[in-house]
Image (cartoon, rainbow, N blue to C red):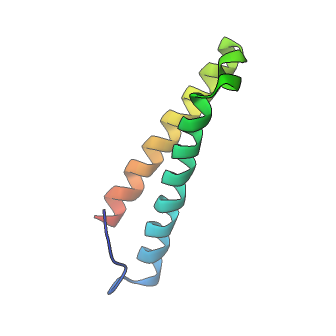
Amino acid sequence: MIESKKGLQPHEIRVVEERTELMDKITKLHKFMNSDFYKTLNEVSHNHFEEQEKAMKSYADVLLKRIN
């Protein structure tokens, strides 16, 4: 991952920032999915959260490709 934004164009900086924010959201989702409350949810809800996680990871991968 890019450690410095120096020398990047404004649109490139936005992509880096967007991925950083997305990775933070993925981390928070993982924390939630490991919570006691999550365990009380039904299978349909679990499937939705897993689908969301997969989509978020896929999007993060695309953003990383754009960065590199």
Up/down of 56 relative to 17, above or below:
above
> From the viewer's perspective, is 10 left or right of 2?
right
Task: Point out the residue furthest to the bottom here.
Answer: 7
Q: In this picture, is 62 found above or below 30? A: below
Farthest front residue in view: 36
Q: Residue furthest top?
A: 43
Q: Nearer the viewer, residue 66 or 24?
A: 24
9 is higher (above) or lower (below) than 48: below
Figure quadrant of the N terminus: bottom left
Total labels: the figure holds 0
In the image, what residue occupies the spot 50% across and 73% down?
14
Residue 24's x, y, as percent? Answer: 53, 53
Q: Residue at x 51, y 38 (%)?
A: 55
User: Looking at the picture, how far across and down is residue 36, in whole percent?
Assistant: 66, 23
Q: Position of residue 62 (x, y in %)?
A: 39, 52
Based on the displayed image, in which of its 4 quarters is residue 8 positioned?
bottom left
Residue nearer the viewer, 6 or 12: 6
Question: In this picture, is 41 found above or below 1?
Answer: above
Residue located 54% across and 60% down the image? 21
Residue under the point 52% across and 63% down: 18
Q: Is residue 56 left or right of residue 32?
A: left
- Give the quadrant of the C terminus: bottom left
